[in-house]
Image: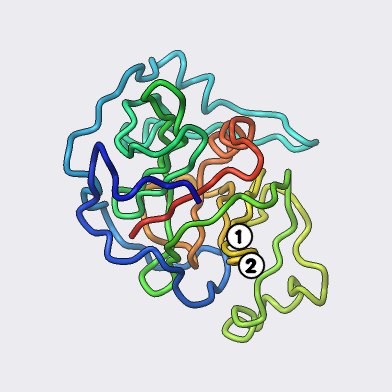
Amino acid sequence: MNFKEPFSRRSFLSVSALTAASALTGCASTSSSVGGPSVGFRSPFSTISGPSDAELAVMYGPVEDGGFLIPAVPYQQIPPRYYRQRVVDPTGQPAGSIVVDTPSRFLYLIEPGGTAMRYGIGVGREGFAWQGSGVIQWRQKWPRWKPPNEMVARQPELAKYSIENGGMEPGLKNPLGARALYIFSNGQDTLYRLHGNPEWRSIGKAVSSGCVRMLNQDIIDLYDRVPNKAPILVLQ
């Protein structure tokens, strides 16, 4: 990976290791959540072109995609910092890279010229989050959800969606939502995903079993922008 060592323009408060944690256990939500984010960068964020109310109504309005009608997001009930917006790049990473700032609940897609698209995210609850560097090896529109066997063992009611049974069909209730980006590290599937999310209330919280979840409207936008084999850095 061609990530810069360490961040040349900003530094994270806590970057203790960039090696992958132990195996991830799935991407479904749980009943518990962890509240507001801590600050991931030392310097304040600088928005270049924050969306207007009219733009937000379009960005998070209903979307017909792949034969499904994605409902509008009540964005007024989401903290504005989690709206999709262009900001000054706080990471110093190469253009085309994805950086996930887990503590602050932000995902950055780095652009040429010192800017980045920033998205609000939901993250894995403590004990299930992954960190490290890798690549977006595979991308999928309206993916099937196949919970790992370890997750099925903990939640037997998910057996009908197991890998052996072919997973859950795509759709609005599928935990992976409208898109999924699959992260590999050292040639191996990390089981860690960037994916859509039908539950807008989870944005800005730690509720999933490890994966990064985004509003369906945002994951569609990210999917269309991300280059093939994009490098990704996930920091805790």
Q: Amino acid at mark 2?
A: Gln
What is the distance, in whole Å, between disc 2 and disc 1 at their CAs?
Answer: 5 Å
Q: Residue at x 47, y 46 (%)?
A: 2
Q: Is residue 226 left or right of residue 130?
A: right
Which of these two is toward me, 62 or 152?
A: 152
Q: Is residue 236 left or right of residue 163?
A: left
* Residue 169 x %, y %: 78, 57
Which of these two is toward me, 116 or 28?
A: 116
Q: Are marks 2 and 1 in contact (CB under 8 Å)?
A: yes
Which of these two is toward me, 97 or 68?
A: 97
Q: To which residue does mark 1 refer?
A: 184
- Label 2: state its secondary structure: strand
* Residue 132 x %, y %: 44, 61
Q: Residue at x 34, y 31 (%)?
A: 89
* Residue 198 x %, y %: 57, 48
Q: Is residue 193 left or right of residue 120?
A: right
